[in-house]
Image (tube, rainbow, N blue to C red):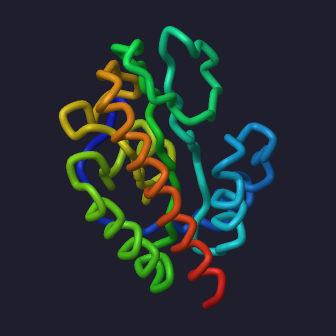
Amino acid sequence: METYTELKDFVDNPHYHRQRQKALRGLDISTIDIPIVPIVEGLANLPYCFTLQSCYGHFLHRDQRDSQNIEPLPISESISSVEYRIAYIALCIQNSDLGRALFHDLREIPAMDPEYTQFGCAEWFWQRQVNSYVLQVEPGRFRTKDRITVDHQEALHIERIRNGFFGELNRIVQERAET
């Protein structure tokens, strides 16, 4: 996110329900990266949030040019640099008890690797939808960028973090669905 900013406090949003319905009507699951479809569908079933945008995170290198590639990075000494396109999920959270509880859960995810995961806001989203938040997997030094180039070893580390990140997010969504 080139517009990533620190967390903002919740504000009143009397239009939340209408905005959520509009977002859900426009949700086209076929455009979501396959590995995160269950997460986006799970969030859509929670009445106190809705997704705005997401990306599984893609790795491009000399042997892989498909910008929608979801294959694991190969272990290879011949790949020196990798372009990483950020893994993230942007969502709007209702200013309610359940919404704030979800916010609290999401805020804990970066603890898995604070140098490579962030929870904050993105000005671009906030201007269009208040109470919007972004969880992302990105080296902290590049947290305001949506694509970067790193060496192969760091890309492998980012991939491990991304996989754990989405696993933890999926766990949270599943737990919330059960309550």
At horizontal 30% and vertical 22% (from top left) the residue drawn is: 150
Q: Residue furthest bottom?
A: 179
For this view, does 105 lie left or right of residue 43? left
Taking the spot 46% from the left edge, 28% from the top edge, the residue there is: 85
Rendered residue at 41%/52% (across/down):
135
Percent across and percent down for residue 131 are 43, 59
Q: Is residue 130 left or right of residue 17?
A: left
172 vs 75, nearest the viewer = 75
The image quadrant where one finds the C terminus is: bottom right
Image quarter where the N terminus lies is: top left
The reply, left or right, for residue 48 in relation to residue 119 is right
Viewer-proximal residue among 72 and 19? 72
Looking at the picture, does residue 179 appear above or below residue 78? below
Count the marks: how many? Answer: 0
User: Please, is residue 70 above or below residue 113 in the view?
Assistant: above
- Image coordinates for residue 148, horizontal then vertical, percent: 35, 22
Coordinates of residue 70 in the picture (x, y in percent): 62, 34
In the rendered image of this protein, does residue 176 appear above or below residue 131? below
